[in-house]
Image (cartoon, rainbow, N blue to C red):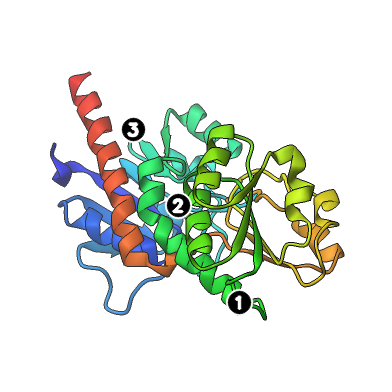
């Protein structure tokens, strides 16, 4: 395919998007960026735009962040001075047929794109890409736990809620560090995998039992299943760490009301931006190549 004919806009994000931009520019495509930290000296081959609208204008592909979208529709862009909320006018300036590649999209963004004929391609739950960035997430989680507790991970009772791709990495790591790991998961195959990794396992309907007397709770489920009623079973010193994308897996308002320490540790892949940026680019590149190939055949 002819990369030189493509315009790629990278909007929002953190230092991972710096590396994605470098990788995209190396293909020969025209690459523009806005809304992520801009390094001193710039990024070779990448144009630094002054607004999201300017960045998206005439773009064939827009790359939005891995962590996704806030409840108000704003893209993940923690160091940007403005909240970037893609609206119909902004997206309508893209060159048709246009495509957006991102971690995951909310219903508002999907509605805009459907009206404009823009394709949306989500990769938040692609297992291969999750595994590639998984170690950065786990290392970041360990940092959060260490900085927010007065006990060792070794011999702590830790309840892991969910045992998918990231949850399974968490379980194996915590068990290897000597934690007493209890896993609550809906899927019986996932529970069997957690058991094989050395954890005590529970069905989700027995979550309260799994949580009882836990020192630390880690959730990787992107749906709020750890409710106020569940949180009442925890001791006051318990630390809650939510790794999931919005809306998260733990009721953080209830945690605050109950005096429990809560950390919403989304975006932990930013701990290793070069490694994670490169790994995510492998998935993005495949999608661009597939979409262009399909368009050429049509």
Q: Residues within 10 Å of mark 2 (few under 14, many from 20)?
A: many
Q: Residue at x 55, y 45 (%)?
A: 195
* Residue 109 % position (x, y): 54, 39
* Residue 297 % position (x, y): 19, 20
Q: Residue at x 35, y 59 (%)?
A: 276
Q: Report which quarter residue 222 is drawn in.
A: top right
Nearer to me, 281 or 264: 264
> Quick one: quadrant of the N terminus?
top left
Tell whether 117 sits left or right of 141: left
Does residue 213 sit above or below 292 in this rendering?
Answer: below
**Residue 96 tag number:** 3
Is residue 66 in view?
A: yes
Q: Give the residue at mark 1.
A: 152
Which of the marked residues, 1 or 3, is nearer the chain's N terminus?
3
Q: Element type at marker 3?
A: loop
Q: Give the residue at mark 2.
A: 66
Which of the marked residues, 2 or 1, is nearer the chain's N terminus?
2
Does residue 173 sit above or below 261 in this rendering?
Answer: above
Estimate the spatial distance between the alpha carbons at disc 2 and disc 1, rounded to whole Å. Answer: 31 Å
């Amino acid at each position: 395919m002819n990369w030189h004919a493509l315009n790629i806009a990278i909007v929002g994000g953190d230092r991972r998007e710096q590396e994605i931009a470098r990788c995209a520019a190396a293909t020969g495509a025209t690459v523009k960026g806005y809304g992520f930290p801009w390094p001193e000296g710039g990024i070779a081959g990448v144009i630094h735009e002054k607004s999201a609208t300017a960045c998206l204008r005439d773009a064939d592909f827009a790359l939005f962040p891995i962590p996704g979208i806030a409840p108000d529709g704003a893209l993940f862009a923690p160091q940007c001075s403005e909240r970037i909320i893609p609206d119909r006018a902004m997206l309508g300036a893209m060159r048709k047929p246009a495509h957006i590649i991102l971690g995951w999209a909310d219903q508002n963004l999907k509605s805009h794109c459907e009206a404009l004929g823009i394709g949306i391609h989500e990769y938040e739950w692609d297992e291969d890409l999750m595994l590639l960035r998984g170690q950065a997430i786990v290392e970041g989680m360990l940092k959060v736990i260490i900085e927010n507790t007065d006990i060792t991970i070794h011999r702590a009772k830790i309840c892991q809620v969910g045992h998918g791709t990231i949850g399974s990495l968490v379980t194996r790591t915590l068990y290897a560090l000597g934690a007493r790991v209890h896993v609550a998961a809906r899927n019986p195959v996932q529970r069997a995998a957690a058991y094989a990794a050395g954890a005590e396992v529970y069905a989700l309907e027995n979550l309260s039992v799994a949580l009882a007397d836990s020192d630390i709770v880690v959730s990787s489920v992107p749906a709020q299943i750890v409710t106020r009623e569940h949180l009442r079973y925890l001791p006051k010193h318990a630390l809650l760490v939510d790794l999931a994308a919005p809306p998260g897996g733990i009721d953080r308002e209830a945690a605050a009301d109950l005096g429990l320490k809560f950390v919403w540790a989304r975006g932990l892949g930013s701990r290793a931006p070069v490694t994670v940026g490169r790994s995510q680019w492998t998935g993005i590149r495949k999608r661009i190549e597939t979409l262009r190939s399909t368009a050429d055949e049509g």
